[in-house]
Amino acid sequence: MEKSCIFPDFPHFLHGGDYNPDQWQKYPEILEEDMRLFKLANCNSVSVGIFAWAALEPEEGKFDFSFLDKAMDDIYANGGRVILATPSGARPAWMAQKYPEVMRVDESRQRHWFGNRHNHCFTSPIYRQKVAEINGRLAERYKDHPALIAWHVSNEYSGSCHCDLCRAAFREWLKRKYGTLEALNDQWWTAFWAHTYTDWSQIDPPSPPMGDRAINGLRIDWLRFAADQTTDFFKNEIAPLRKFTPHIPVTANLMGFHTSVDYRVLAKELDFVSHDSYPEWKGTAADIRHASDHAARYDLNRSLKHKPFIQMESTPSNTNWKQFNKLKRPGMHMLSSMQILAHGSESVLYFQWRKSRGAAERFHGAVVDHVGHENTRVFRDVAEVGARLKKLEEILGTVTESRVAILYDWQNRWALDVAQGFQMSDKKVQKTLQDHYFALWRRGINVEIIGEEDDFSRYDLVIAPQLYMTSEKLIGKIADYVRDGGEMLCTYMLGMVNENDRCHLGGFPGGKLKEVFGIWNEEIDTLYPEDSNRVEWRGKSYRAFDYCELLHAEGAETLAVYGEDFYAGMPAITAHPYGKGKAYYVAFRGEDEFLYDFIGSLLEERGIVSDFDGALPYGVTAHSRTDGETVYVFLQNFTAQPQETETSRVWRTVEDGEPVSGRIALAPYGTLILARKPGEPG
């Protein structure tokens, strides 16, 4: 296995962030001071031009690149590199005034006025033309500039448009998918409420305020179309970049489990994944679970292309847009920065370098505060992270090896979100994934978060919580995986509908899944918040809440039963050998300790352990990267108290090469980065 970093011509962890010289053109002394502070903060890269269209093209057809020329030259002269942005996330006022069709139309069929951002139409030919033109001019101008290392395309793609152009494009998308109205009506089950369509022109996007919201197939296909249209817009954006700078990689910054775009569709077009990360650290015991939840986001980003990613945005301090914008406690910035690296990032980048003087984000955290100098706590924290990154460069380009995967699918999430039934307001799909992930994170187990197109055979254990939507292709893939020796854990709601949200016939789980798992789910009991049941497993009693399925074992071994209610004695946990593998089923929602214990038993069965051999106290984790020879472990303490663990091996610290063995002490919010080759003593 060869190390392969994202930027081989600049083999360093990137450290810096969003730089907005377009906002400071009237303040040359501040732009000059930025360069001095840039080096003091141990920064080596910036993202430039993300919302700079009005500065780049102040009037239609009149371009001014002077501020950007200077920024590119200044950053390079000070040893830095530039991730150059395309400005499509916010168009200038003259464009919205002259070409109102570029503005988005919402669900109520109201066209947005000029203002805000991310409110453009992805279908508009005029907007696509204007974006291609400005992107082409940027690419042609800077194609040979030595500072340019990557393209930051637009910003945080999201949402959809309901204008006439998008509605027409949606109908064409449906024609390509279904071919005939007869096929569409059959899959959407439009005979319900006399919704049968007799002409393509009758189909409109779902509109909860004033239109259809009862046909789930329509709602899910609209979200699929919006994801495809977003991706098509992205491809239009990058065409001129590919033409003039084929050697420069492109990315778009993603937002974790954000629901409006299927990132697995968009990620196929990215050269590398980038991600925006804004944890809400509280300085309390809640930070332990919060750290796990964000680690899942990082693993998702790494898993989208099974490669290292970069963190494009974070804050060195607080945000300004959450309900409560609390400061990071001392030590938390270093800890959270090292956590990102532990899960596969090759950067620690910030929004923003310098606080804006006015408008919405003037109180958002930044490296440089309004005071304008380096004598602040936050600046010192940033400089310390930058100095540490320089000592860790032997880790650059290493990968994460995982024997466990969790299956997460945006379209399955959409299907459950729109399903009328169960808990109506929130099916807790993401939280359920994170509950299962937490059981692995606590043990220091590396995890990938995969989609149905990924190769299941790479993993010893695949976990699929709430896998409600299953196509025949996915059902077959699960069956093949288990038959060939894989271990599969699924939960309540398995296999209830097909890919168009039409119920499987013959009982749940649908199709061959009943054979694979050896069960039949007759009913599902959705409990009130004050309700619960009990399940005993291996002599320990666990609380069951939210959902309890009434399960029949049809070949499966019953591992545990319900203890209460009219279905007391019915199976709650089952196991079923199938071919060379085994399929496990949990029919209820369980608390953290149940998942920790039960998933732990599956790991033990497969011999899956952390790369760190010591016991991990609650709140301490150990995740790893490798170059195929050396294993690098990030031993991290997410508690405000000192912690201890013990190792029977001999490690070395990456930063100073000192040997470490026996008892290991971790400071509050501390990170120790260890390295070891398998053949080394101990």
Image (cartoon, grey):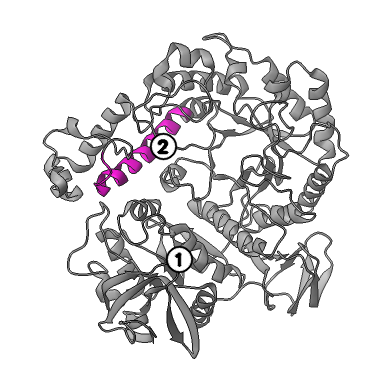
Callout 2: SS: helix
| The furthest residue to the bottom | 539
Mark 1 packing: few (<14 Cα in 10 Å), some, or many (20+)?
some
Question: Per the image, is 388 magenta?
Answer: no
Residue at image mark 2: 231
Residue 120 position within the rendered picture, expressed as x and y whole percent measured from the top left: 45, 26
Question: Quarter of the image containing the N terminus?
Answer: bottom right
Question: Quarter of the image containing the C terminus?
Answer: bottom right
Q: Main secondary structure of the magenta part?
A: helix
Q: Find the magenta span and give its range.
A: 212-237
Mark 2 packing: few (<14 Cα in 10 Å), some, or many (20+)?
many
Up-down: is 117 above or below 333? above
Residue at image mark 1: 458
Q: Can residue 436 be seen in this view?
A: yes
Contact (Cβ within 8 Å) of mark 1 with mark 2:
no
Callout 1: SS: helix
- Left/right of residue 610 with respect to residue 121 in the rendered view: right
- Left/right of residue 613 with respect to residue 535 in the rendered view: right
The residue positioned 43% from the left and 59% from the top of the image is: 429
On the image, which quarter does residue 427 sit in?
bottom left
Residue type for callout 2: Thr
Question: Per the image, is 213 magenta?
Answer: yes
Residue type for callout 1: Arg
Residue 602 position within the rendered picture, expressed as x and y whole percent measured from the top left: 48, 79
Q: Can residue 480 be seen in this view?
A: no
Nearest to N terminus: mark 1 or mark 2? 2
